[in-house]
């Protein structure tokens, strides 16, 4: 008779925590780039889309706004679903959906079909992107997490610039006669590669005690974002009808109701969609406040410069995109050096970055004033190069600060809150600075409207710099 022995549960080795390797990090960063590239890639393609599909200005704005609204509204929900059902599962599903909706955008026969496909693409992005940050938070630690977060911030910033450059190149290349459609179709092979890699190298992570979806909070957050962003993005093109003013008037009341519902759920021990207790983390709270003016100014600048270079300076899509190459190049190389600068100087790097970005935008405004309409790569080179350095010293650092103290169990919620804040601010930037620029053109002309808008952007940069002085000196 043989005697079997069992190891007491308390003495069994704990299961190995999931680890994100180098190829896995590359895969999730590739996925992080896709939604941001697609937010900006259409900026230089809009004139061609309008001609080909006979789309009005308001419908073209919906091509941009529909994607941004769906993306912003569903991001926090995407993070919660990843915590609940597994982040790798949501990541794979979101990436597959992103590829299919990109194909639908590229094959859209009408303008309204394109708008619908873009809304679906934004929803797919909202399922995929929160899993990137949550996986990094849950599957890395120590210096590896700091490096991964730095690379995420660099990827995010570079993607926003590269999207506009890539869009110009693809539209002009007219690959196989696809014209503007290639800016969406190019996503399909990238997604296929990403899915193959993700299935092999991205570990599965989830919250240890996942909470059910917060239905009332989800609905109220969606309504509050829609009441703010929808009228701001569509108001000017629609002539500011009554519904836009009613929507804006409703926003503070809906936002207050959302906060009250979330606060009650938090006090009752449940995990609401956006836990108010999460904002007790000083690094998260102050970092989110800085993301707002930075992203508003950045996205507004990208939209305005695309319109000014094509419709005002008469540049083609390629030339308009290439004019931003100096900004992209300096951003990339500065991002590489960023972690060493942070280790030595702490978060004061953000303050220095805002000063440099302000100098760069000032040089661009000066170039527009002096050289108009001969505004191209050479005229924008000094200002673009300096602005790229300044932006690279801010965005990656801010992302690290926001999530530095968020516990792994709430990684999905924290990343969803951060990306929602960023995406909402990107949409606000196009809506506010873009609307200001387009409204000033009839009375001031393109040059003066551009210079005035750039000077307004300088105010958002100054605000970012002042707010950065309140950041913790070091990153946890």
Image: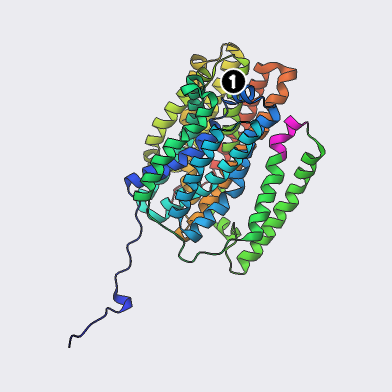
Left or right: 161 in relation to 57 = left
In which quarter of the view is residue 234 placed? Answer: top right
Say if residue 283 shows up in the picture: no
Q: What colour scheme was applied to this rendering of the protein?
A: rainbow
Going 61% across and 44% down the picture, which residue do you hit? Answer: 70
Task: Please name the residue shown 49% across and 43% down the image.
Answer: 398
Q: Nearer the viewer, residue 258 or 121?
A: 121
Relative image position of residue 175 (x, y in whole percent): 46, 23
Taking depth in this image into account, of 471 and 371 the one nearest to the observer is 371
- How packed mark 1 is, by other alpha carbons closer than 10 Å (few <14, some 14-19, many 20 or more), is many
User: From where the camera sits, is residue 2 visible?
Assistant: yes
The chief SS type of the magenta part is helix
**Above or below for 175 versus 90:** above
Residue 195 location in percent, x, y?
Answer: 41, 45
* Magenta part of the chain: 231-239
Q: How many marks?
A: 1
Residue 256: which quarter of the image? bottom right
Nearest the eye: 48 or 232: 48
Q: Residue at x 77, y 39 (%)?
A: 244
Q: Which residue is mark 1?
A: 365
Residue 339, x across and y down, in percent: 38, 40
Q: Position of residue 201 (x, y in %)?
A: 34, 49
For the residue labelled by badge 1, is the local secondary structure a helix, a strand or a loop? Answer: helix
Where is 102 relative to 285, above or below? above
Residue 90 in the image: above or below residue 16: above
């Amino acid at each position: 008779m043989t005697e079997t022995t069992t190891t007491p549960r308390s003495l069994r080795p704990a299961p190995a925590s999931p680890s994100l390797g180098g190829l896995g990090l590359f895969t999730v960063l590739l996925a992080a780039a896709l939604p941001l590239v697609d937010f900006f890639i259409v900026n230089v393609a809009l004139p061609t889309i309008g001609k080909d599909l006979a789309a009005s200005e308001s419908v073209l704005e919906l091509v941009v706004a529909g994607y941004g609204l769906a993306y912003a509204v569903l991001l926090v929900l995407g993070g919660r679903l990843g915590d609940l059902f597994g982040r790798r599962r949501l990541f794979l599903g979101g990436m597959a959906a992103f590829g299919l909706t990109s194909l639908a955008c590229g094959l859209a026969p009408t303008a309204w079909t394109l708008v619908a496909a873009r809304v679906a693409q934004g929803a797919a992005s909202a399922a995929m992107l929160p899993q990137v940050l949550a996986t990094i938070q849950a599957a890395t630690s120590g210096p590896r997490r700091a490096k991964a977060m730095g690379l995420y911030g660099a990827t995010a910033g570079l993607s926003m610039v590269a999207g506009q450059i890539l869009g110009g190149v693809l539209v002009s290349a007219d690959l196989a006669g696809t014209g503007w459609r290639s800016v969406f179709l190019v996503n399909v092979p990238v997604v296929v590669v990403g899915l193959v890699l993700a299935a092999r190298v991205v570990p599965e992570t989830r919250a240890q005690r996942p909470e059910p979806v917060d239905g009332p909070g989800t609905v109220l957050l969606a309504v509050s974002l829609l009441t703010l962003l929808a009228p701001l993005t569509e108001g000017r093109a629609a002539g500011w009808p009554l519904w836009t003013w009613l929507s804006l008037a409703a926003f503070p009341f809906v936002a207050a109701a959302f906060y009250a519902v979330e606060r009650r759920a938090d006090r009752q021990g449940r995990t609401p969609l956006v836990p108010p207790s999460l904002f007790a983390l000083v690094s998260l709270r102050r970092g989110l406040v800085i993301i707002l003016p930075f992203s508003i100014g950045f996205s507004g600048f990208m939209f305005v410069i695309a319109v000014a270079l094509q419709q005002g300076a008469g540049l083609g899509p390629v030339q308009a995109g290439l004019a931003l190459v100096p900004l992209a190049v300096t951003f990339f190389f500065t991002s590489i050096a960023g972690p060493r600068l942070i280790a030595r100087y702490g978060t004061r790097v953000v303050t220095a970055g805002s000063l440099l970005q302000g100098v760069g935008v000032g040089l661009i405004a000066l170039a527009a004033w002096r050289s108009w309409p001969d505004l191209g790569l050479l005229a924008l080179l000094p200002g673009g190069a300096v602005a790229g350095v300044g932006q690279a010293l801010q965005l990656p650092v801010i992302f690290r600060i926001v999530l530095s103290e968020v516990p792994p169990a709430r990684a999905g919620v924290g990343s969803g809150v951060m990306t929602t804040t960023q995406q909402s601010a990107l949409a606000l930037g196009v809506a506010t600075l873009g609307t200001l620029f387009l409204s000033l053109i009839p009375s001031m002309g393109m040059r003066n409207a551009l210079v005035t808008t750039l000077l307004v952007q300088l105010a958002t940069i100054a605000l970012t710099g002042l707010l950065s002085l309140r950041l913790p000196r070091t990153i946890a």
